[in-house]
Amino acid sequence: MATKFRRTKSEDRILTAAADLFYTHGLRGVGIDQVIERSGVAKSTLYAHFRTKEQLVAEYLRRTDTSWRAQLSAAAEQAGDDPREQLVGMFDALSDAFDRHGFFGCPFVSAAVEAEADSEAHAVTVEHALRRQTWLTELCRRAGAADAAALARHLGLLIDGALTSGRLLQDGGVVAEAKAAARLLVAAHTGTAA
């Protein structure tokens, strides 16, 4: 049986520092010494929680996955009870993220580019994409989409594209454009007016 450890304040400080650094500078652009300096913990403390940088990166991505999916879900719910409106409303989470953090793109797209294909970080990134698509597919099904999986894939591409374009162009307007495209896609897949 695996032993489960209680998260400590030091671990939270390490993960918070790592998240800020990885999000801003990328996974490869940040060294362990930078995380140690930003978090204010001793090197031995960091290594007591995370034996390797790869473990630290994977835990950062797991934490980001939980947070990001919660933000998408909350934005969808704030759009009302109609699943069609929720599919469009979830794009407000992207606007909120841009307003909070600036235009640093999607941590999972960045990880997919930077992480080795056989790494734990890559595996966590794939798991995130699959969980998000499962959630989107179910929401598309509730919205009455004729092909819920196809609509979910299209909306996933819009999310990833908006985050990537926002990073590249430094323009939050891409989210409004993605949201407008999502409204058209949802209408086309559910046979309703846009």
Image (cartoon, rainbow, N blue to C red):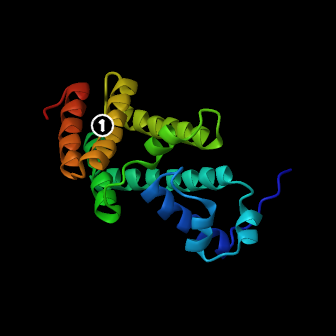
Q: Position of residue 175 (x, y in %)?
A: 23, 47
Query: Does residue 86 appear anywhere in the picture?
Result: no
Q: Which residue is mark 1?
A: 158
Residue displayed at 65% across by 75% down: 9
Q: State the image quarter where residue 5 is shown.
A: bottom right
* Relative to 171, 26 lies left or right: right
Q: Quadrant of the C terminus?
A: top left
Check disc 1: other Cα within 10 Å, few if <14, some if 14-19, many if 20+: many
Q: Position of residue 150 (x, y in %)?
A: 36, 24
The one nearer the camera, 90 or 129, is 129
Residue displayed at 13% across by 32% down: 193
Q: Position of residue 156 (x, y in %)?
A: 37, 36
Residue displayed at 31% across by 55% down: 103
* Relative to 14, 128 lies left or right: left
Q: Residue furthest left?
A: 193
Q: Position of residue 158 (x, y in %)?
A: 30, 37
Residue displayed at 21% across by 51% down: 171
Q: Is residue 187 above or below residue 111?
A: above
Q: How many marks?
A: 1
Q: Is residue 84 above or below residue 29?
A: above
Amino acid beneath label 1: Leu
* Relative to 24, 166 lies left or right: left
Q: Residue furthest right?
A: 1
| Circle 1: element type | helix
Query: Does residue 61 appear anywhere in the picture?
Result: yes
